[in-house]
Image (cartoon, rainbow, N blue to C red):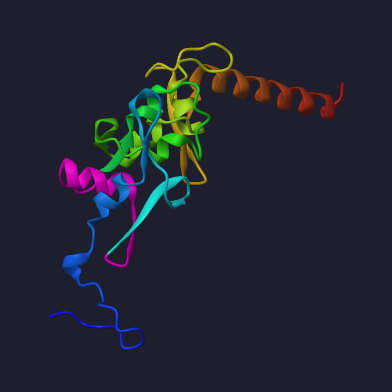
Amino acid sequence: MTKDCPTCNRRLPTPADRVPAADRVLAKTVPAQGGCIVFTGWTKGGYGMVADDSKEKRAHRVVYEALVGEIPAGLVLDHLCHNRDAECPGGHCIHRRCVNPLHLAPVTNEVNSLSGQSSSARNLAKTHCPKGHAYSPENTVVVHRLGRPFRRCVTCHRVRTREAYRAQRQRALEEAGP
């Protein structure tokens, strides 16, 4: 049974009349470099967005679920095209609007964060400390500061501790006098 608008007597759309969200997303895409299919509609935080059942949803998730299947619980979609593009500055880049399911992979949030170009990802890619010592299991300790983990070079820490001890000892000897 259809309903008419009481004001203008036009027929109101029913749920059966609604165009699926994935079709609406795909209608607003253009091909881009590297095989990306870029959504040209509404964006939020750099990601393409679409309204579906009165909820905001990310366009790449809607298309992935429609064409590939459900995203496993506890996983997020990683834009593989972003990870391959060394020229990409990160942040609000074109890759966040890519809806090509071949460019998306379900991964854990940790893997997604570290595969990008964030400071965490760049630091984890480092194999040596600033002084040139290897970040090996024997020479690395993970320390938490303000709730965040970071790697500390054991060799550098020993050197700093030794130098601080010597400086403190020297000051104490100077204060004690001859």
- Which residue is outermost to the right? 178
* Residue 133 position within the rendered picture, expressed as x and y whole percent measured from the top left: 51, 12
Position of 6 compared to 169: left or right?
left
Residue positioned 41% across, 25% down in the render: 33
- Decide: is 1 above or below 63: below
Residue positioned 16% across, 47% down in the render: 70
* Residue 172 position within the rendered picture, expressed as x and y whole percent measured from the top left: 77, 28
Q: Which residues are magenta?
A: 53-74
Residue positioned 26% across, 76% down in the render: 12
- Label tally: 0
* Residue 131 position within the rendered picture, expressed as x and y whole percent measured from the top left: 58, 14
- Decide: is 100 above or below 48: above
Q: Nearer the viewer, residue 126 or 114?
A: 114
Q: Quadrant of the C terminus?
A: top right
Q: Quadrant of residue 30?
A: top left
Position of 140 compared to 55: left or right?
right
Is residue 131 on the magenta stretch?
A: no
- Which residue is outermost to the bottom? 6
- Decide: is 30 above or below 153: below
- Decide: is 15 above or below 116: below
Residue positioned 62% across, 22% down in the render: 160
- Which residue is outermost to the left? 1
Q: Nearer the viewer, residue 53 or 172?
A: 53
Work out whether residue 173 can be spotted. Answer: yes
* Residue 54 position within the rendered picture, expressed as x and y whole percent measured from the top left: 31, 67
Q: Quadrant of residue 156?
A: top right
Position of 65 compared to 164: left or right?
left
